Image (tube, helix red, strand yellow):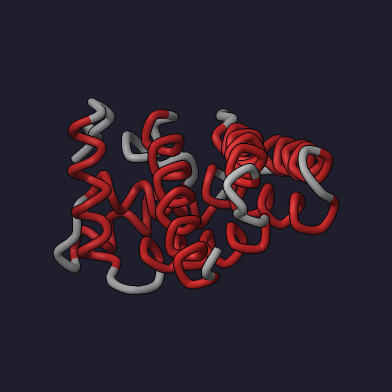
């Protein structure tokens, strides 16, 4: 498989994996910690969406599905499938407990990407493609434009009925 095509496909798959899991687990609904509240409200002041800002703040402040997906891909790359993904899921689970995070989005992200990588390997996609793809996926949410990406995340939250009620 062409590496550029593989990285692009892995980025799209990884992006969908972590955004759907994090939205389904309620990241856009409310900030889990004070830092996520500050980030969400700051993004809103700069023209972004509050729910999307809460989503972005939550993934900065605790190991949610974005971190779980990245660590799961790294674990699979370093240790193989499924062992590396399972070790990553355990470490993310411990990280969630240390952060007093009430959810399991990070653990679910690590487990789901492990399954995805196992299935994608049948099509010739290596775990390394998913590591690079996940870095690109996170960059589209956190590194390009907070206000634009928060509006996209807010629209996804509305469609999944996970939009915030907070003002």
158 horizontally vs 79: left or right: left
Viewer-side residue, 132 vs 153: 132
Which residue is farthest top?
Answer: 161
Please say whether residue 101 is visible from this viewpoint. no
Coordinates of residue 83 in the picture (x, y in percent): 83, 40
Q: Position of residue 20 (x, y in %)?
A: 39, 37
Residue 144 in sight from this viewpoint = yes
Residue 115 vs residue 160, the one in the foreground: 115
Total labels: the figure holds 0
Where's residue 110, x and y in %?
A: 64, 40
- Quadrant showing the N terminus: bottom right
Image spot of residue 85 (x, y percent): 74, 42
Locate residue 7 relative to residue 98 in the image: left or right.
left
Q: Residue at x 40, y 65 (%)?
A: 142
Residue nearest the viewer, comparing 152 with 83: 83
Q: Is residue 113 left or right of residue 140?
A: right
Quadrant of res 154: top left
Q: Quadrant of residue 167?
A: top left
Q: Residue at x 50, y 65 (%)?
A: 7
Residue found at x 27% / y 56%:
41
Q: Is residue 71 left or right of residue 50?
A: right
Q: Residue at x 63, y 44 (%)?
A: 117
In the rendered image, which quarter is residue 158 located in? top left
State the residue in front, 106 or 12.
12
């Amino acid at each position: 498989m062409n590496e550029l095509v593989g990285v692009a496909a892995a980025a799209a798959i990884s992006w969908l994996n972590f955004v759907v899991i994090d939205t389904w687990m309620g990241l856009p609904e409310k900030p889990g910690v004070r830092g996520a509240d500050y980030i969400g409200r700051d993004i809103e002041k700069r023209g972004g969406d509050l729910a999307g800002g809460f989503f972005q703040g939550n993934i900065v402040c605790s190991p949610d599905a974005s971190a779980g997906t990245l660590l799961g891909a790294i674990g699979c790359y370093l240790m193989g499938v499924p062992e590396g993904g399972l070790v990553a899921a355990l470490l993310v689970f411990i990280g969630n407990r240390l952060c007093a995070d009430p959810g399991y989005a990070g653990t679910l992200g690590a487990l789901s990407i492990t399954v995805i990588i196992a299935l994608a390997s049948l099509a010739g996609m290596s775990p390394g493609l998913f590591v690079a793809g996940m870095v690109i996926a996170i960059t589209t949410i956190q590194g390009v434009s907070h206000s634009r990406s928060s509006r996209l995340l807010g629209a996804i939250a509305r469609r999944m009925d996970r939009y915030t009620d907070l003002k």
